[in-house]
């Protein structure tokens, strides 16, 4: 049973109901809210038959100001890293509708200024992508173009007219014969033309182009589909099991909030790597070999990205919107946006019948152990690691702790504390619904709003909990934390080869991944420092964390290690032999006596009922 309890004690929460809908009349849904003389921007994206090195873009501005400043974002919402921005844009020209060239001045890395001389229409042309061809052909899950397909990443493809990001746009795709379009953008009567109500929506709607497989299904009464890039081939995986997984994940997540907050949803599986959330779509990297073995291979990342349709795409930290594309934006609350999303990933898979109780508990125990052996847990609060996402480990004294991991565990901690203190009357599900109902609008939420929502839903005061575990770094008393569900956490020492080394993605344009060294580890004793750029590991070039994982996976005690690092621009070599060390593993086990109450609370957590 799901109960929504509105307790009127916390300030501001229950004052007024949120606006019902921004549409006031029938015709509102069909009208572009722009004045006749307002600037309007439309785009044509062309994939040339003979060219897979760039997307060629034509940007037509009606009624532009003079001068007209156009710019490319410095970062993409959801990925808190600076992109190469303006460096991806080349072949930039501007002309009037009749082809008369206009003078263009490059203002800075991200911005161009066009002297329009009062022309009523200005056409800007450019190519998007200046990466090397071989790099471009190696698809990541964000942006690529190759023989049989392409993925258009809005923030790196579409320039905006400065000051006019709320204007609607039409986008026309001109593609090689036989190519289709899979995107969350609004379709029109012309299958090659799509519509976006604003620039924010436009760049939050990636588009898969090419020959791909499409699977459609309904969840929560709403149309969903998956578009899957198969490299031009046919599906070599169990498509029924794949779609069954998608439907279960979609239904379960929609069930938590009661309804879907979009009119349709598109899962885009393309390229390699993780996933990125979008307004009514998500891009997820796909490994077709793993899919052939297990059609549910990507269920974890799928559930995570889909839960973002509520948590972060609509219910967002106040600082993240309206988007400021020109500079890094900091917030204390990524542990909620990402970490709580990880917690719900576990719950969704469990509740959807896609994970077992042992699998669920093993996942939680692995997270507890990873947290417990990271010394940063005692110095970096979840709010602090959220705030410093743009920085290297030096911002936190050389330590690094993921707000994904912290928020994942805080989700469990909070959920059990709420269920325990209310005898199972309410849960974190109710808090998420409460937050969504009140803050998934224009303003977003603050830390205080989140605490108030927990207090309002539970009728208890969680200020001390917040002080200890959210803004503070108190050690989590695990046995106390999970007792309400009849569990305890057993830590057990295990002897392992010491290959401890983590990689942090590049934090600036053009950077290499940098290492996070665990104090006392073999790498630290050999002289490696947090912040060093890792060039190679045992002769293997390192470009991403997957490369390092592959390089260290099979290391045994006594094996030699040789690394090349870059420190302050100077390359040097380090070597050592892999020693053994003792690591603590965790297991979640039943208490000697599991009470009826604990069974009830546990069952409610696992089933969502
Ligand atoms: Zn995420």
Image (cartoon, rainbow, N blue to C red):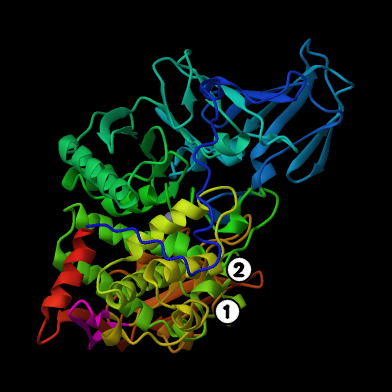
Image quadrant containing the C terminus: bottom left
Mark 2 vs mark 1: which is more N-terminal? 2
Q: Is residue 178 left or right of residue 220?
A: right
| Picture coordinates of residue 351, whole percent (x, y) | 21, 56
Q: Residue at x 20, y 64 (%)?
A: 604
Q: Which residue is mark 1?
A: 396
Image quadrant containing the N terminus: bottom left
Q: Which residue is mark 2?
A: 391
Residue neighbourhood size for the residue with mark 1, other residues' Cα within 10 Å, grouped as few (<14), some (14–19), many (≥20): some
Residue neighbourhood size for the residue with mark 2, other residues' Cα within 10 Å, grouped as few (<14), some (14–19), many (≥20): some
Relative to 398, say whether 437 is above or below. above
Q: Is residue 199 left or right of residue 47?
A: right
Q: Does residue 28 appear in this view?
A: yes
User: What secondary structure prevails in the magenta region?
Assistant: strand
- Mark 2 touching mark 1, by CB under 8 A? yes
Magenta stretch bounds:
482-497
Q: Residue at x 26, y 33 (%)?
A: 218
In this view, the residue in front, 99 or 282, is 282
Q: Does residue 541 appear in this view?
A: no
Relative to 529, say whether 45 is above or below. above
| Image quadrant, ligand 1 | bottom left
| Picture coordinates of residue 329, whole percent (x, y) | 64, 58
């Amino acid at each position: 049973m799901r109960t929504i309890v509105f307790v009127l004690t916390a300030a501001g929460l229950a004052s007024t109901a949120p606006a019902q809908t921004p549409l006031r009349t029938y015709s509102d849904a069909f009208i572009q809210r722009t004045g006749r003389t307002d600037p309007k921007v439309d785009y044509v994206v062309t994939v040339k038959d003979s060219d897979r090195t760039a997307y060629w873009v034509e940007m037509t501005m009606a009624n532009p100001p003079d001068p007209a400043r156009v710019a490319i974002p410095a970062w993409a919402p959801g990925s808190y890293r600076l992109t190469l921005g303006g460096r991806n844009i080349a072949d930039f020209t501007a002309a009037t509708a009749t082809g008369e060239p206009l003078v263009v001045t490059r203002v800075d890395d991200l911005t161009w200024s066009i002297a329009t001389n009062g022309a009523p229409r200005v056409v800007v042309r450019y190519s998007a992508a200046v990466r090397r061809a071989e790099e471009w052909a190696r698809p990541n899950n964000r942006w690529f173009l190759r023989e049989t397909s392409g993925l258009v990443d809005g923030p790196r493809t579409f320039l905006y007219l400065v000051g006019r990001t709320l204007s609607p746009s039409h986008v026309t795709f001109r593609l090689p014969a036989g190519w289709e379009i899979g995107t969350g953008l609004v379709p029109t009567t012309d299958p090659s033309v799509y519509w976006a109500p604003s620039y924010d929506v436009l760049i939050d709607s990636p588009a898969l182009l090419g020959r791909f497989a499409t699977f459609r299904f309904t969840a929560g009464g709403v149309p969903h589909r998956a578009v899957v890039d198969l490299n031009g081939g046919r599906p070599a995986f169990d498509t029924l099991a794949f779609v069954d997984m998608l439907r279960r994940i979609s239904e379960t997540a929609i069930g938590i909030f009661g309804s879907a907050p979009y009119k349709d949803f598109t899962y885009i599986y393309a390229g390699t790597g993780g996933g990125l959330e979008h307004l009514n779509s998500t891009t997820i990297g796909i490994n077709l070999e793993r899919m052939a073995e297990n059609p549910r291979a990507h269920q974890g990342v799928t559930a995570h990205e889909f839960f973002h349709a509520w948590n972060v795409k609509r219910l967002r930290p106040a600082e993240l919107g309206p988007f400021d594309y020109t500079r890094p934006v900091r917030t204390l609350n990524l542990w909620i946006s990402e970490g709580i999303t990880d917690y719900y990933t576990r719950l969704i898979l469990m509740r959807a019948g896609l994970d077992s109780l042992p699998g669920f508990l093993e996942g939680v125990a692995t997270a507890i152990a990873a947290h417990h052996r990271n010394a940063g847990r005692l110095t970096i609060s979840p709010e602090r690691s959220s705030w410093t996402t743009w920085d290297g480990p030096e911002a936190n004294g050389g330590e690094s702790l993921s707000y994904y991991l912290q928020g994942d565990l805080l989700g469990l901690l909070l959920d059990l504390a709420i269920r325990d203190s209310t005898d199972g009357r309410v849960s974190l599900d109710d808090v998420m619904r409460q937050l969504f109902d009140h803050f998934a609008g224009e303003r977003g939420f603050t830390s205080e709003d989140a605490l108030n929502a927990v207090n309002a839903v539970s009728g208890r005061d969680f200020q001390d909990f917040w002080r200890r575990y959210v803004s503070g770094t108190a050690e989590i008393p695990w046995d106390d934390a999970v007792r309400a569900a009849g569990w305890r956490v057993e830590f057990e020492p295990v002897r392992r080869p010491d290959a401890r080394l983590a990689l942090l993605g590049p934090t600036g344009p053009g950077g290499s991944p940098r290492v996070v060294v665990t104090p006392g580890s073999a790498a630290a004793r050999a002289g490696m420092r947090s912040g060093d750029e890792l060039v190679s590991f045992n002769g293997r070039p390192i470009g991403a964390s997957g490369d390092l994982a592959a390089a260290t996976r099979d290391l045994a005690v006594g094996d030699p290690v040789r690394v090349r690092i870059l420190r302050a621009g100077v390359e040097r070599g380090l070597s050592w032999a892999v020693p053994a060390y003792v690591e603590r593993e965790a297991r979640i086990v039943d208490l000697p006596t599991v009470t009826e109450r604990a069974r009830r609370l546990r069952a409610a957590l696992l089933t969502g009922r």
